[in-house]
Image (spheres, grey):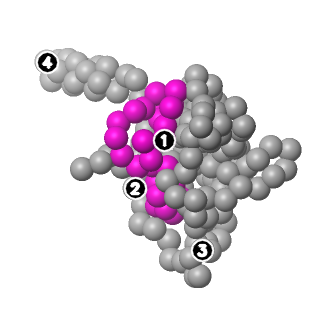
Amino acid sequence: MYQWSFVSSVAVALAMLAGCGETRPATPAIPPPATVNGKATLSDDEWRARLTPLAYAVLREKQTELAFTGRYDKHYEPGVYRCAGCNNVLFSSKHKFDSRTGWPSFTEPAASESIYTHSTDREAVLCARCDGHLGHVFPDGPPPGGLRYCINSAALRFEAAN
Ligand code: FE
């Protein structure tokens, strides 16, 4: 019994060590919601049931994750970043750069029709399929475009290139 609990403790410790570097669990993959005219139209209760509390806070309540805490801030594997709410392909690793701001940053979306922006006090970036709040776009990005799409990791789910 003692030996078994010792082995279990070591296994848990190793699992925790292996998890270092990933400050947030990956957003679970979910089936895309049904769409009407290209728009996902779920009720607030349905969104709450589909999303993790953090993803719900960002996507549906327009909150911002703490800087340097997101899973994809320092993530540079080749692949695409899908919307954590509806699976829409939003950004590509080809356009990701290290802005040193603490949030995943892209120079442009994967496709212009993937997102849209809405100007309030800042230029908000939203998913074109589910209207989920993704982050903001600022005019201080690298040339030639000069834009920085500052996106919450919690709004994204990475899919590695094959
Ligand atoms: Fe979406």
Which residue is more in the foreground, 104 or 108?
108
Q: Residues within 10 Å of mark 4 (few under 14, many from 20)?
A: few
Marks 4 and 3, the one that precedes in the sequence: 4
Q: CA distance from mark 1 to mark 3?
A: 25 Å
Residue stretch in magenta = 71-98
Q: Secondary structure at mark 3?
A: strand
Which residue is more in the foreground, 87 or 107?
107
> Does the Cβ of the disc 1 residue fall within 8 Å of ligand 1?
no
**Circle 2 or circle 3, nearest the eye:** 3
* Disc 2 to disc 1: CB gap under 8 Å: no
> Does the Cβ of the disc 3 residue fall within 8 Å of ligand 1?
no
Marks 2 and 4, the one that precedes in the sequence: 4
Give the amino acid at mark 4. Gln
Q: Which residue is mark 1?
A: 95
Q: Residue at x 58, y 64 (%)?
A: 113
Marks 2 and 1, the one that precedes in the sequence: 2
Q: Which residue is mark 4?
A: 3
Q: Residue at x 69, y 43 (%)?
A: 137
Residue 80 makes an appearance in the image: yes
Q: Residues within 10 Å of mark 1 (few under 14, many from 20)?
A: some
Which residue is more in the foreground, 138 or 152?
138
**Circle 2 or circle 1, nearest the eye:** 1
Q: Is residue 88 magenta?
A: yes
Q: Which residue is mark 3?
A: 39
Marks 2 and 3, the one that precedes in the sequence: 2
